[in-house]
Amino acid sequence: MFHSDISHFSRRHLLAQSAFGLSGLAACWLQQSQQAAAAPPKPDLTRRAFDLKPRQSAQAPQATAMISMFMQGGPSHIDMFDPKPELTKRHLQSFTGDIKYDNAGEASSRLFGSPWRFRKYGQCEMDLSELVPHLGSVADEICLIRSMHTGVNNHGESINALNTGRQLRGRPSLGSWLSYGLGTECQDLPAFMILTDPTGLPVLGVENWQNGWLPAVYQGTVVRPQEPRILNLDATPELRGRRQEHLLNYLRQVNQQYQEQHPGELDIAARIQSYELASRMQTAAKEAMDISKESESVHKLYGIDNPVTKDYGTRCLIARRLVERGVRFVQLHTGNQTWDHHGGITTALPDVCKKTDQPAAALIQDLKQTGLLDTTLVHWGGEMGRLPVIQNEKNIGRDHNTYGFSMWLAGGGVKGGCIHGETDELGHKAVTDVVNHYDYHATLMYLFGLDASQLSFARSTGLGSLLDGQPGRVVSEILRRPPEST
Amino acid sequence: MKCQAVPDCADCHENSIRNARPECGLVGSCRVSHILPLFAVLLFCATESRGATGPETELRFEQDVRPILKAHCWHCHGEEAELKGGLDTRLVRLMMKGGDSGPAIVAGNHSDSLLYQKVASGEMPPADKKLSEAETDVLVRWLDAGAPTSRPEPEHLPPGETLMEEDRQHWSFQPVARPEIPAVRHAELVRSPVDAFLLSVLESQGLSFNVPADPATLVRRLYLDLTGLPPTPEVVERFVSSESGNAWELLVDEVLASPAYGERWGRHWLDVAGYADSDGYSEADPERKWAWKYRDYVIRSFNSDKPWNQFLTEQLAGDEMLAPPYQDLTPEQSDQLTATGFLRMAPDGTADSASEQMLARNDVMADTIRVVSTSLLGLSVGCAQCHEHRYDPVTQEDYYRLRAIFEPAYDWKNWRNPNARLVSLWSAETRTAAAAVDAELAEIAVKRTTELDSIVAETFERELTKLPASVQSLARQARETTADKRTDEQNQLIRQYPFLNVDRGSVYLYLPDRLTGFTKKWDELTEETRKKRPAEDLVMCLTEEPGKIPVTHLFSRGDFQQPRQEVAPGELTVLNTSGSSIPLDDPGLPTSGRRLAWARRLTSGDHPLLARVLVNRFWLQHFGRGLVGTPGDFGVKGERPSHPELLDWLARTFMEEGWSLKKFHRMILTSAAWRQSSVRRPEHDAIDPENRLIGRMSVRRLEAETVRDAMLAVSGQLTTQMYGEPVPVSPDDVGQIVLAIDTRDSAGRPSGKMIPLGDREFRRSIYVQVRRSMPLGVLEPFDLPTLTPNCEQRSSSTGPGQALMMLNNPFVQQNSKVIAQRVVKEAGSDTASQVQRAWQLILGKKATEAEVQQAVAFLADEIAAAEMAEEVTPQPSAPTEGAANPEAVPVEEKHSQAALSLLCHALLSSGGFLYAD
């Protein structure tokens, strides 16, 4: 059905149309999206109505969608991504340098070399540990950053730093910024969707997808971890079809009259939109969540046939389906403190890697096969890494480390087979080409054709932006088309 | 939304307020000045004017520079006894002296100042959070101006001392003033002193109040505000057509007297207290079977307008107003004990063996301190659990002083699990009656066993006769020998004749019928006797064990495994202006008296924070925003009050007029300000888009409970039964949380069994069980708070989840149907009258002519379409409803009823229902 060189954008269009027919609605949307294409590069202070119509970015985007696999708790970079021969050499020796523990009570000063072997993967010869062999198979597609730094040693704060730009609470999350800046290419699904883990929400809970001080329409929509993935998606038999359509038409009229009586109330406008979206989601969301039509080989690729990888694999596949349908930002969460290995790391870390490694690698492979990887930025990472010393001698673990840790990106304009930055010889602190959260955000926004310091919202306290005056550097070394060459 | 786990060290590194809240890049500067530069000075004339640092204003160390250094530098250079690099940045003279690298500052020259160089190069502070440009700019200007201070610096500064004169100057720590009611130009607009305060600020901006809202809107606003339920059309009509001059005042009094008032306003307090019917903390989330008594206490207290000084004292120290062992209490005394449930609301993981016990115990205390400090002090003292508060003048020792007030009751080393803390409210008489029943039950048990034993013996004898006579005596011997002493021969015999082993458990195999009868007889007797036992009556409360007073230690880094110096109970240093003290152990009381002393101090009438925090929260509920926009944070990072004089006037009036909330309500509700229209005006929006000056009413979305309760009220299904055990919640077969008795098996699998709840299904939402891990499906989408541990201010979001619920949840549809039936019953068969009635019931006002026409057309279309659909696909001849009802509903009526139900559904989903104008 699809020609091989079909652009990803039109593929998304075609999918939307073939699934739901080119209804009047879709036609109307096409028209709207063309009208809305002239978005201003500067903050639009006069914008009073907020919606999710697609807007063009100031610069030509390299990424048009993002999937973030957030690994809350702090995956141990020195056991997975960042080999440290010196650490292995000095295994169980005393560490004499300056180190910040989160839990001083259990801290030991003895170094702990990684019990897992590293080897080289791909043509790029990327060193990865035996914990992530599947990732190794796509090493040539990913860009591994080994010099991440937030410097705030608590989960909540560091999550906020990476997810909202600051360690404080109450700010808009990345998905909200992208939805605000770019709207969505799919008017039948929320722009910003969250796939949570069956075992519960990550630290900070619903704040991970809050809109902060951006309008409520940019809040993330949560997909439940089991069926039904979205509640109240089915109309009761009596209301299905024509009756509901009639109800919605009439409701729109009544609400518009109410809005006319309350000019300037943005929340009412957002509510009218929420009904429109909800009605379209009834079919679209169900279709998007239904993975039964995916081939057996795809199911196998993601490990959906295996009880260990089934849950995360299913969610990765759903994420691909959402992005394929034009959702702007999808974030997958692991459970509460899944990666927070203060103790028992030698068994707990392999366990969680087994659950996530194959699905995460499958996502890259699948996106690559379907041609979506070029324009879909994939992120894998937690809010911190872990210390090279032992925490809890009796049940060995590693304490928090936000001074140097790893994460990886793929697709969406990022170089494949690339390693960026270094930590010190023990993996404690990022020392070369350090990337902090401001840099990460500046880079991410750049890939979307946005400027992290320009895209802003008129708050009561002045303009607010993702960077809010903090310096953020676009990390051009990891980009296929860095700013200089565009 | 699942029960949210508390992040580790959440106390240190999360603000206490749950919701999005503006924060300002400029530490210690007045953020409001960014919004309203025109009248910032005017608004803050009673407080500091940190915001007004224009170029002409000279910067001072204490006001302008110190807050920046405190936030960014003091942790290493000042606060700890050991100074990094020998540099102390707490005073200008200390910075001039400098550290190992020489002087940190050079007055008059920023570029020569090491401090500036380190900051500008990004080397300092070493952590992630750098100084903002504005902060650096302040440093530069201040250094260039010669690094001036406001006053001579202290000669002595003890190591680590961080509390200085400037900290005491923070607005909320000042005594509550007694401001004059200001004069206004348009005195004719003033109906209440509140109006004068608001109007004087509005007038200074060339603004004024909005026009009054129309009467029907006002009545609906009043009912939703005070009762969380919509008014009936009759009440609206009565008020709209009333010509009496004081009709509004009479209506306000009438609604305040309604029992529904306590159910609505009690809910606000329960948010702040973090009320829940489950322990939270861990996955198990065990139920708290008796928490509801505290909820009922709160509702009763609101309805009886219990003075707040009493209300709070009871909640903090009700047990200390009584004497242990808390027996034979009068109803008032029971209330006092129940009130301490306030201090038992925090999540408590100690009933779950999976929790790490010592940690869980200390977490209960930390969460309780969070609830107490945010609700009563408007301060998030939690930061000081691990280190000096970054922004507020709360030292780590202060935190443990506060903790010491509560220590004797919690006593973490001699912990009592939640069940062990329950106290029985039985009277002596009831206890005797229960003991008598228990004795009777014991006797029954003995008799039952005796009879059973005789049946066993009888069975044995009977079976024995069936054996050959030769083995009978051997067999008897075998039976009478204990198992371990039997000979091989005896064992052989028993294997051959199993009846030889007949006992209480196996006798039914020989005499099934007789045993069935036996069991039935005794079971019935036991059950009947047990029924005579008085029902359990326990209360979840906080008590002390007399004579046991544990020592409080400061915990280094907040870690209970690293205890440091002993700390005595006391108030936060910065608040202790009166020199009042809290006893270690009050000799006049059987308990330590610590909480009682603190409660008396808080409610003494001269506490700077308590009344301000309370009236601000009341204001927030009436207007949708507090005079201080951060109701749980009156500290440095919190917002400054928009109307400081008004806040003080309200606080003072509240205390002086008997701490009566109902008086407060009357004052607000009869004001012109509260009765304004909510429609925005461009001229007002241009100057005050956030409506901080209250030049109109704010449009507010109904809260989760109000959405549900109002639907039930409109459909007429609402059960008005008050108080008692909560209506249980349980997951349904798809995992949505519904009102139902949990019939899942121990592995959590659905059993498919349904136990009807009857009328309880239609009780108000405040009576719905608050299971932290199971938010009710119809409440959750509308921002039901997650209580970890409490909620200072609810958020109000708008998203497709709410829309999907309104469209597709069976609850909404069922209510729409019932409303449609009610409409027909009350308005008859005329379509226009039906529309009018639906409008009045659901939206609280009359439909305009155009609206009626539009709705009538909608109904006609819908009926026509339904008829057409029926012609295309004929319906089965015997509809299920007809089976239950012998008089089958005529087809036309069925269609018109369905159409009307659809209309009601649309109105329930509309802005007119979901918002209060």
Image (spheres, coloured by chain):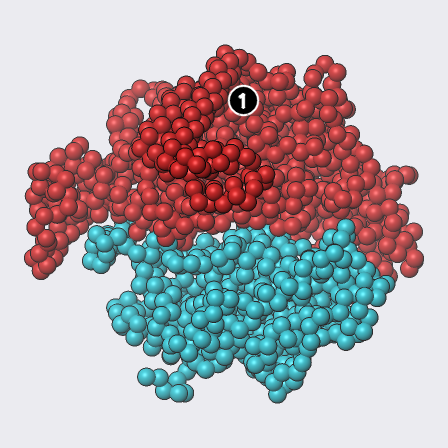
Instruction: Describe the element under mark 1 as helix, strand or loop.
Output: strand
The tint chain B carries is red
The location of residue B622, given as percent across then percent down, is 46, 33
Compared across the picture, whether B835 is left or right of A260 comes to left
> Which quadrant holds residue B549?
top right
Chain the render paints cyan: A
- Residue at 89%, 47% in the rendered image: B93
Q: Residue furthest top?
A: B429
The location of residue B857, given as percent across then percent down, is 15, 49
Compared across the picture, whether B67 is left or right of B908 comes to right
Compared across the picture, whether B123 is left or right of A366 comes to right
The correct choice, above or below, for B275 with respect to B123 in the image is above
- Residue at 79%, 33% in the rendered image: B567
- Residue at 67%, 55% in the rendered image: A154
- Residue at 8%, 56% in the rendered image: B874
Foreground pick, B299 / B206: B299
Residue ID for mark 1: B424
The location of residue A268, given as percent across then percent down, is 37, 50
